[in-house]
Each structure stands twice: as structure tokens, then as C-alpha cells.
């Protein structure tokens, strides 16, 4: 996983915030991020951009699944992408 500032970590850290929808894709925008890491334009679907690291956290719904794609670019050279698939747990 990656934390709020795009640093790779070994454990999941929950965050609160909002989801901004653009063309049927949701972009996760967390609360409490550092001011210097806010994207220049509110229209950019980035959750973090400090000039060296850019983080985009997108969600899409497919059938009964939620797909979350976390993309991180560091120094415009190192690319990381993580895809998580969530599905609803049925009551037993």
C-alpha cells in the first residue's frame, strides 16, 4: 500500500475524505493532507502532488465488484500501480 503522501508502506492505513466523480470514475481525495501536496487544480484527479510524487486513487464499479486502482509516479521515473478488487460479502 501507499500512504497519504505516496510513500510505500507495509500496512493499510484507513483515511477519510471524499469521492469526486468524473465520467463514471470516482477519485478518492483524503482529508488532512499537507497543503504543499494538494494538486494545483481542483479538476485534476490526483489525491497528492508535491512536484516529485503524484498519486491517483481511482474507483470503478463493475457488476457486484468495486475496483480500486492506485497509481504512483515518483520523480517522473518510477511507476507503481496497485489494483484491488472488492466484492460484497453475502450474509450466511
Image (tube, grey):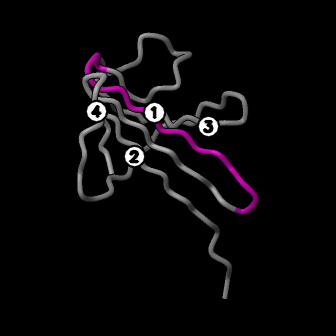
Q: Which residues are magenta?
A: 50-64
Q: Secondary structure at mark 1?
A: strand
Q: Are marks 3 and 2 in contact (CB under 8 Å)?
A: no
| Sequence-first disc among 2 and 4 | 2
- The residue lying furthest to the top in this view is 40
Q: CA distance from mark 2 to mark 4?
A: 24 Å
Please report the residue visible at 60 percent of the width from the left and 30 percent of the height from the top. 20
89 w.r.t. 84: above or below: below
Q: Secondary structure at mark 2?
A: loop
Front of the two marks 4 and 1: 4
* Residue matched to label 4: 78
Indicate the quadrant containing the C terminus: top left, top right, bottom left or bottom right.
bottom right
Q: Which mark is residue 25?
A: none
* Residue matched to label 1: 56
Q: CA distance from mark 3 to mark 4?
A: 24 Å
| Sequence-first disc among 3 and 2 | 2
* Residue matched to label 3: 26
* Residue matched to label 2: 15
- The residue lying furthest to the front in this view is 77
Left or right of residue 81: residue 4: left
User: Residue 11: x and y, percent?
Assistant: 27, 59
Front of the two marks 3 and 2: 3
Q: Residues within 10 Å of mark 3 (few under 14, many from 20)?
A: some
36 w.r.t. 61: above or below: above
Please report the residue visible at 24 percent of the width from the left and 57 percent of the height from the top. 10
By secondary structure, the bulk of the magenta-drawn segment is best described as strand
Front of the two marks 3 and 4: 4
**Image-quadrant location for residue 72:** top left
Front of the two marks 3 and 1: 1
Q: Does the magenta run of residues contain 57?
A: yes
User: Residue 59: x and y, percent?
Assistant: 58, 44
| Sequence-first disc among 2 and 1 | 2
Amino acid at each position: 500500500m501507499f500512504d497519504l503522501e505516496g510513500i510505500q508502506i507495509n500496512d493499510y492505513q484507513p483515511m477519510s475524505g471524499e469521492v469526486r466523480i468524473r465520467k463514471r470514475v470516482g477519485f478518492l481525495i483524503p482529508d488532512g493532507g499537507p497543503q504543499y501536496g494538494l494538486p494545483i487544480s481542483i479538476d485534476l484527479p490526483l489525491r497528492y502532488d508535491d512536484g516529485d510524487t503524484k498519486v491517483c486513487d481511482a474507483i470503478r464499479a463493475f457488476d457486484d465488484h468495486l475496483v480500486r486502482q492506485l497509481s504512483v509516479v515518483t520523480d517522473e521515473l518510477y511507476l507503481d500501480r496497485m489494483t484491488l478488487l472488492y466484492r460484497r460479502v453475502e450474509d450466511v
